[in-house]
Image: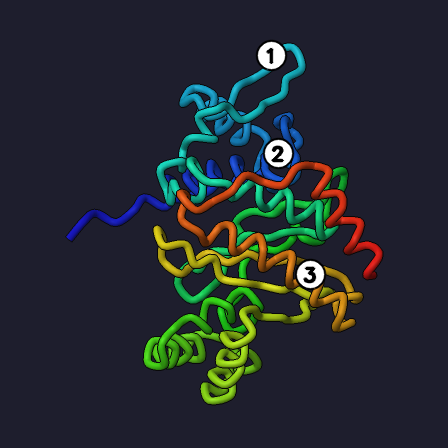
Amino acid sequence: MGRPLDPKKVKSAQRALEVLEYFKNGRTEATVMDISRSMGYPQSSTSELLACLVTLGYLTKDNKARTYRPTARVAVLGASVQPALFSEGQLLPVMTRLADDADATVILGNRVGLDVQYIHMVSPEGAYDDEASAYGSAPLTQSAMGKAVLAAMDHNSMRGLVHRLNAECTSDQRVAFDQLEQECIEIDAQGYAFMKDERGRWLIAMLISHPDHDKSLVLGLLVGKDCEDDEQRDNYVQLLRGAVARLSAPKSAQTPLASPAIRSTTHAALQLAG
């Protein structure tokens, strides 16, 4: 048997990753106090942690301004993971384009065990969606993104997973398998999942079925109450479908992103439809 993990080292590793996550969503630099207050860490241990990340090359420090910012090492840290989408592909540009065209927040989700985790978000240019940044993770059966993942599973795999979820969740989150399976059949037929969140907004989610990775990545569009209108929802769905189709195609079949003029025309059409 291997040695048990040192709780202190596990906690330090968790905090290091949380610091790197802190710099998402438009944050480019921060002071020790910024991170200490946001994360709820003691100031002294935050200083030590940031100094360690500087030594390792993941952060750089502006001694005059006393601020820290991520280095290029962070950007290449996971570049080898699913290269067709990340280091060699157009995932982030496609998300940015979709956010601007739909004038809505775009969320990238990833299945991790029994949950779907929201690993990256892009807001329309010039906007920052503070409510969307609060998204973290959700059980597969309790979110549009999770149901998009479930809809791609075979009957037995889904049943086994739902059984595990029901055994571990609270009584109010348990679901009837037959009802969920029927819902997933409908999701698979229409090509997307559609669900209102606890804040009253709608999330439209589609699976990214790229041939070079497993079926665990989902793209979502977080929209307002106007999505209850069928015509407006169709507009959002078509924009999301186009983005997913682009990401799902092999690299050899991908075409350049549309020019700004074409993008602005698409965006204007959506605004008029609303």
Residue at left offset 44%, top offset 60%: 111
C-alpha distance separating marks 1 and 3 = 46 Å
Farthest residue in the left direction? 1
Q: Nearer the viewer, mark 1 or mark 3?
A: 3
Q: Earlier in the sequence, mark 2 or mark 1?
A: 2
Quadrant into which the C terminus falls: bottom right
204 sits to left or right of 165: right
C-alpha distance separating marks 3 and 2 = 36 Å
Q: Looking at the picture, how far across and down is residue 95, in whole percent?
A: 59, 46
Residue at left offset 47%, top offset 44%: 254
Q: Residues within 10 Å of mark 1 (few under 14, many from 20)?
A: few
171 sits to left or right of 104: left
Residue at left offset 71%, top offset 62%: 235
Numbered circle sitting on residue 31:
none
Q: Which residue is mark 2?
A: 35
Contact between marks 3 and 2 (CB within 8 A): the answer is no
Q: Which residue is mark 3?
A: 236
- Judged from the image, the secondary structure of the residue bearing numbered disc 3 is helix
Residue type indicated by callout 2: Ile
Residue type indicated by callout 3: Tyr
Question: Where on the picture, by quarter, is residue 261?
Answer: top right
- Judged from the image, the secondary structure of the residue bearing numbered disc 1 is loop
Q: Looking at the picture, how far across and down is residue 124, in whole percent?
A: 72, 44
Q: Is residue 160 above or below residue 86?
A: below
Q: Nearer the viewer, residue 16 or 4?
A: 16
Q: Which residue is mark 1?
A: 63
Residue type indicated by callout 1: Asn
Q: Is residue 29 above or below residue 144?
A: above
Q: Nearer the viewer, mark 3 or mark 2?
A: 3
